[in-house]
């Protein structure tokens, strides 16, 4: 029991000595005056300024950009006619073959006459007989030796005989199948010995000069195309063509909702072929746009395509843009202000509404050269 009293007294002496020395900090205690003075000193210290992110910007202004409508198309002959047989018969004579150039009226093929000459002779003899009978009856009617009905009957027989002769003559003319237009024979079925029936083609003649470049234009762009406007075309063969819009279809294709547009191109010597793939360019009115580097175009959280610019307060702002063309020098876009400070470096590290510091491209180049 004495030992516990002894330890308690010893501890009390130590604590009393600490209080007497005034060193309260070792016990975690501090006078109120010292705490206030420290708080005041902390308030007097200047706050550390937050460092702003630096981006590189470039000024872009609007320019007048020539615009054009690019459509895939193909070449097509200006006109194509199937020359059909109008009577039947075996082909006895042919003067042309596929690829030959023909003129209007040229004999393509001639059919055999068969019994047409004999039938014509018979019809002519019948005509002479009917004519003689009609004339005799006509004289008898004048003398009132026969009736008007007899005269009418003989007149009908005479007319029928005359028609039979004309019919055979017409049929004989059909044995000569001639070209109805100038052009090129692109298909020929009238080989010697072939049997042609009415409605079967002897040949197909196509007009290659002028030749057409046909394109299917969508319903959103069809109002931009006008009759008579110039258009350019580049074929897959490398040939470059220039012509005018000659026809615009008044109705759209039901399945594709596109309108057929025909560009007429001169083709001397028929050098251009039918069915060649082409890229047709319809020049349109110029529009205002910005030409910017393609690499600075990005997407925002909404999936909109655009670029980041800096306003007068050095605040980042995302501007949605419309892409209207691509060149080797950059991308043409619409939607930016007339004069825009566009971020061209560091745009991936800043967000919309963030305040930044800026540096021009030429400033960076000058600083690099000085160092």
Image (cartoon, helix red, strand yellow):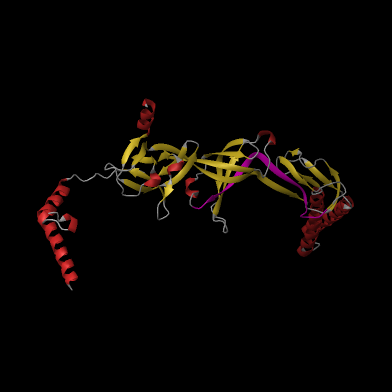
Residue at x 37% of width, y 45% of height:
308
Locate residue 88, reporting x and y percent.
83, 54
* Pick the front one: 56 or 250: 56
Locate residue 191, reporting x and y percent.
84, 46
Locate residue 194, reporting x and y percent.
85, 50
Figure quadrant of the C terminus: top left
6 shown above or below 267: below
Counting every numbered tag in the picture gives 0
Query: Which span is picked out in magenta?
Result: 196-219
* Pick the front one: 234 or 173: 234
Figure quadrant of the N terminus: bottom left
Residue at x 65% of width, y 38% of height:
237
Q: Does residue 213 belong to the magenta stretch?
A: yes
Residue at x 39% of width, y 44% of height:
347
130 shown above or below 311: below
- In the drawing, does residue 45 fall left or right of residue 84? left
* Pick the front one: 160 or 61: 61
Q: Quadrant of residue 151?
A: bottom right
Q: Quadrant of residue 289?
A: top left
Residue at x 40% of width, y 52% of height:
300
Locate residue 23, reporting x and y percent.
14, 54
- In the drawing, does residue 74 fall left or right of residue 191? left
Q: Does residue 138 belong to the magenta stretch?
A: no
Q: Residue furthest front?
A: 2
31 shown above or below 61: below
* Pick the front one: 262 or 304: 304
Residue 364 visible in this rendered orientation of the protein:
yes
Report the magenta stretch's main SS.
strand
């Amino acid at each position: 029991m004495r030992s516990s009293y002894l330890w308690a007294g010893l501890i009390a002496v130590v604590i009393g000595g600490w209080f007497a020395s005034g060193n309260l900090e070792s016990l975690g205690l501090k006078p109120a005056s010292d705490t206030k003075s420290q708080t005041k000193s902390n308030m007097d210290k200047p706050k550390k300024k937050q460092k702003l992110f630096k981006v590189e910007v470039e000024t872009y202004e609007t320019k007048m950009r020539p615009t054009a409508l690019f459509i895939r198309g193909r070449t097509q002959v200006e006109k194509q006619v199937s020359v059909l047989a109008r009577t039947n018969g075996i082909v006895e004579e042919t003067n042309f073959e596929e690829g030959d150039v023909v003129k209007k009226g040229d004999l393509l093929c001639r059919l055999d006459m068969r019994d047409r000459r004999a039938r014509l002779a018979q019809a002519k003899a019948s005509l002479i007989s009917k004519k003689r009978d009609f004339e005799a009856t006509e004289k008898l009617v004048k003398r009132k030796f026969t009736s008007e009905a007899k005269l009418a009957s003989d007149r009908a027989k005479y007319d029928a005989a005359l028609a039979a002769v004309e019919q055979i003559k017409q049929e004989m003319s059909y044995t000569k199948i001639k070209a109805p237009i100038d052009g090129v024979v692109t298909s020929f079925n009238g080989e010697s010995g072939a049997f042609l029936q009415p409605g079967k083609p002897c040949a197909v003649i196509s007009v290659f000069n002028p030749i057409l470049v046909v394109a299917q234009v969508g319903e959103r762009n069809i109002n931009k195309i006008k009759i008579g406007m110039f258009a350019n075309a580049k074929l897959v063969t490398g040939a470059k063509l220039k012509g005018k819009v000659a026809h615009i279809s008044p109705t759209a294709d039901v399945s594709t909702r596109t309108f057929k547009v025909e560009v007429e191109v001169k083709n001397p010597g028929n050098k251009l072929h039918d069915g060649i793939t082409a890229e047709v360019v319809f020049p349109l009115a110029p529009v205002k746009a910005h030409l910017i580097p393609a690499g600075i175009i990005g997407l925002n959280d909404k999936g909109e395509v655009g670029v980041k610019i800096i306003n007068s307060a050095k605040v980042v702002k995302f501007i949605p843009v419309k892409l209207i063309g691509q060149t080797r020098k950059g991308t043409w876009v619409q939607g930016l202000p007339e004069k825009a400070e566009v971020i061209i470096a560091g745009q991936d590290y800043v967000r919309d509404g963030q305040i930044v510091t800026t540096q021009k491209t030429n400033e960076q180049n000058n600083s690099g050269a000085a160092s």
